[in-house]
């Protein structure tokens, strides 16, 4: 006798589950969960880690772990056994350990590879669609006749006009690539000549270049990036569908 799940008048069984998973776009998320579970299965947790993780879970759920009756009701409603619950509680710890064990040693080189995109810039921008106007504004700025912020408020045609042309601080991967490249080679306070970026003529001034540091927050972010790349590759390479069996 095959297992099934009934939701209202819909019975989910072996005959229709694939089509439902595909229709609801749940094949990739399910594959992700399975791949992670297999990857972290052998990652150990200390008694202290288990204790702290369980305390945090029950505190967040506002549940007393000693209240067996309420706990059993919760488990039944979530279709979990006590053992499965503990696996779910420890999963985040095991996953973070797996990321560190797998990519921790290559993090420094990955950071250096990504650094130019992660560094931040604070810059001022004036943009217009009139080349002649842009050239005139540039000369006024170079000769010190006008203040950049005032000209941006008066002439810039983007939302930056509201901030006196000031943008950022933002990571260098946020602006248009041509803008980022010009800012990367500019000196603070330098007004760059008008240049065409798409439909706009822009005047730029680098205000401040902020070099990123590999602190704990950035380390975690980069580990998540490497993990994300890996899990996407795993899903792409391991999920195989035999359409003849599900037709």
Image: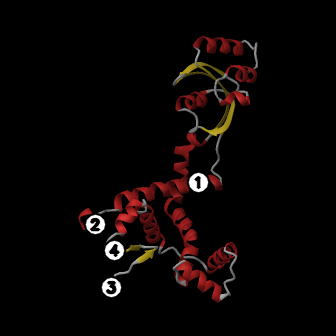
| Disc 2: CA contacts within 10 A as few (<14), some (14-19) or many (>=20) | few
Residue ID for mark 2? 246
Q: Earlier in the sequence, mark 3 or mark 1?
A: 3
Q: Is residue 208 visible?
A: no
> What x and y, as percent, mark residue 105?
52, 58
Q: How many circles with numbers are drawn on the protein? A: 4
- Distance of label 3 from label 4 (alpha carbons): 11 Å
Q: Given contact means CB atoms under 8 Å apart, are the residues at marks 3 and 2 in contact?
A: no
- Disc 1 designates what residue? 221
Is residue 98 visible in the rendered image? The answer is yes
Q: How is the image coloured?
A: secondary structure
* Residue that appears at 70% across and 27% down: 161
Within-10-Å neighbours for mark 4: few <14, some 14–19, many 20+: few
The residue beneath circle 4 is 14
Q: Secondary structure at mark 3?
A: loop
Q: Earlier in the sequence, mark 2 or mark 1?
A: 1
Q: Which residue is mark 3?
A: 1
Q: Nearer the viewer, mark 3 or mark 1?
A: 3
Q: Earlier in the sequence, mark 2 or mark 4?
A: 4
Helix, strand or loop at mark 1: helix
Nearest to N terminus: mark 3 or mark 4: 3
Label 3 to label 2: alpha-carbon separation? 19 Å
The mark lying in front, picked from 4 and 1, is 4
- Hey, which quadrant is residue 118 in on the image? top right
- The answer to whether residue 161 is above or below residue 224 is above
Look at discs 2 and 1 and give the one toward the viewer: 2
Contact, mark 3 vs mark 4 (Cβ under 8 Å): no
Quadrant where the N terminus is found in the figure: bottom left
Residue 247: % across, % down: 26, 64
| Earlier residue among tags 4 and 1 | 4
Secondary structure, mark 4, is: loop
From mark 3 to mark 1, how far is it between C-alphas?
47 Å
């Amino acid at each position: 006798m095959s297992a099934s799940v009934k939701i209202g008048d819909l019975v989910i069984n072996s005959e229709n589950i694939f089509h439902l998973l595909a229709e609801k776009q749940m094949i990739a998320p399910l594959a992700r969960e399975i791949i992670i579970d297999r990857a972290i299965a052998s990652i150990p947790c200390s008694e202290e880690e288990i204790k702290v993780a369980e305390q945090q879970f029950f505190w967040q759920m506002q549940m007393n772990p000693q209240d067996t009756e309420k706990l059993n009701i919760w488990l039944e409603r979530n279709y979990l056994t006590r053992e499965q619950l503990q696996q779910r509680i420890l999963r985040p710890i095991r996953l973070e350990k797996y990321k560190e064990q797998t990519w921790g040693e290559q993090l420094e080189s990955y950071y250096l590879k990504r650094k130019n995109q992660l560094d931040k810039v604070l810059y001022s921008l004036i943009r217009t669609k009139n080349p002649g106007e842009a050239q005139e504004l540039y000369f006024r700025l170079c000769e010190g006749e006008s203040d950049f912020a005032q000209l941006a408020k008066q002439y810039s045609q983007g939302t930056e006009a509201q901030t006196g042309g000031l943008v950022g601080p933002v990571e260098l991967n946020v602006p248009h690539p041509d803008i980022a490249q010009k800012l990367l080679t500019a000196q603070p306070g330098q007004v760059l000549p008008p240049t065409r970026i798409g439909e706009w003529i822009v005047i730029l001034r680098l205000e401040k270049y902020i070099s990123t540091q590999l602190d704990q927050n950035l380390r975690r972010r980069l580990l998540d990036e490497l993990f994300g790349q890996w899990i996407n590759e795993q899903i792409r390479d391991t999920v195989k569908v035999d359409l003849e069996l599900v037709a």
